[in-house]
Amino acid sequence: MNVDKLIIQLEKKHPGELEYLQAVREVLESIEEVYNQNPQFESAGIIERIVEPDRILTFKIPWVDDNGKVQVNLGYRVQFNNAIGPYKGGLRFHPSVNLSILKFLGFEQIFKNSLTTLPMGGAKGGSDFNPKGKSDHEVMRFCQAFMTELWELIGPETDVPAGDIGVGGREIGFLYGMYKKLAKENTGVLTGKGLNWGGSLIRPEATGFGGIYFVEEMLKIQKSNLKGKVVALSGFGNVAWGAALKATELGAKVVTISGPDGYIYDAAGISGEKIDYMLDLRASNNDVVAPYADKFKGSKFFAGKRPWEVKCDIALPCATQNELDGDDAKKLVANGCILAAEISNMGCTPEAVEVFHSKKIPFGPGKAVNAGGVATSGLEMSQNSMKLNWGSEEVDQRLHQIMTSIHEACIKYGKEKDGYVNYVKGANVAGFLKVANAMVDQGVI
Ligand code: 2IT
């Protein structure tokens, strides 16, 4: 395999799909060595097959807003790979959504889902619809229109969507209701469901909790832990909320959250009612964090800036892709940061990752660190299949064990001669091998 040649070919085929090409390049660079050591991969054409989605559904979503005006959005489902299980991955509703972003997310999801140890393939979907500022009725009409197109492609044993940015419990409820009406069945076709209609305990917390369990493991091998560590995180949604809760519980002090409007610095620490307030901020539907500074005296709002300029021990991007760049990484390192981990998908640019690697700062990539969300979706699917519910302790303990095993897999394939762990390589190789071997076993299909 020749990575540069493959990327040039892909660039020609998919011009301008920058996020997708970025995600593919990172994985190819990591697996090049193990790929070339396994000639069965080359003869089965694994690389050429794994970088292209199995299929992409694109559809139009016309709906009527509260003023009686017709709106038109675009919808997508990218079914990337189902070698080890049904297609699985979230739906993102955000104005920035386009095919490149959904292809990068679907591609990442293949390896992430493989790392969870559960039988799930990779997929992603969504729309350029913006739920911010919309009424509940508008969101309902949109979700119903979206599902009218999607339902025939998905099913509890074929493709199981879930939430991502802009898709939470409310949206999953409306989507599920419409699927149920169209398919005339009550099954685990979506995850992130409400607790009294098939959802799993701990699913809302899982991405953040799992991320912090992973960070704990990263610290443990350095004979350290979270007690007293100062944590800078970005975002203020579901992922940031879960991460803040668990990091605080384990003794860390979270000093930042952020939104599209800027970031909040709270030197006293974002804990207790301040973490609960993140839910109010989100419910206000305005996509801003500035009101936090009015409510909690002593905190400060920095308009239009990112939180990576503050002094911290640990940096955790929890918002979106490429939200921490090379300059941010340099600032963090200069300020004494000892660990960075993406709880968002591809939160760091390649330049940022390069800075962390060159300074031997442990860096956890999203597909390992944030796998707890989809892992708990997998546990929701298991509970749905068995038609029974586990208690929160049981789910949490399984989640914790899965995160520990993902960390072990990263060490197995990512530990370098000097003892530094390249988690990017570890996660990519471990995730890839399982899927590639399954593809070899199953023939050219
Ligand atoms: O990026 C992700 O892993 C998710 N948004 C969760 C996907 C899922 O199927 O639970």
Image (cartoon, grey):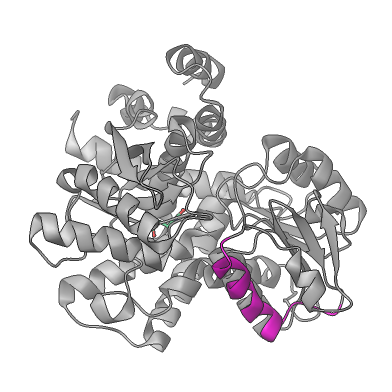
Residue drawn at x 35%, y 28% is 52
Depicted 103 relative to depicted 43: above or below: below
Q: Main secondary structure of the magenta part?
A: helix
Q: Residue furthest front?
A: 67
Q: Quadrant of the C terminus?
A: top left
Assign ligand 1 to one image quadrant: bottom left
Q: Residue furthest left?
A: 184
- Asked whether residue 295 is in view, the answer is yes
Depicted 124 relative to depicted 166: above or below: above
- Asked whether residue 230 is in view, the answer is no
Residue drawn at x 24%, y 76% is 197
Q: Quadrant of residue 244?
A: bottom right
Please provide percent x and percent y for residue 204. Answer: 46, 72
Q: Quadrant of residue 82?
A: top left
Residue drawn at x 58%, y 54% is 344
- Would residue 169 appear left or right of 443 to someone viewing this image? right
| 285 and 227: which is toward the camera | 285
- Would residue 387 appear left or right of 134 to someone viewing this image? left
Is 283 within the magenta? yes
- Would residue 286 appear left or right of 56 to someone viewing this image? right
Q: Residue furthest right?
A: 334
Total residue callouts: 0
Depicted 249 relative to depicted 145: above or below: below
Residue drawn at x 86%, y 52% is 333
Which span of residues is magenta-colored?
268-285
Please provide percent x and percent y for residue 14. Answer: 45, 18
Depicted 29 relative to depicted 117: above or below: above
Please provide percent x and percent y for residue 296. Answer: 80, 79
Is 282 within the magenta? yes
Please provide percent x and percent y for residue 329. Answer: 80, 46
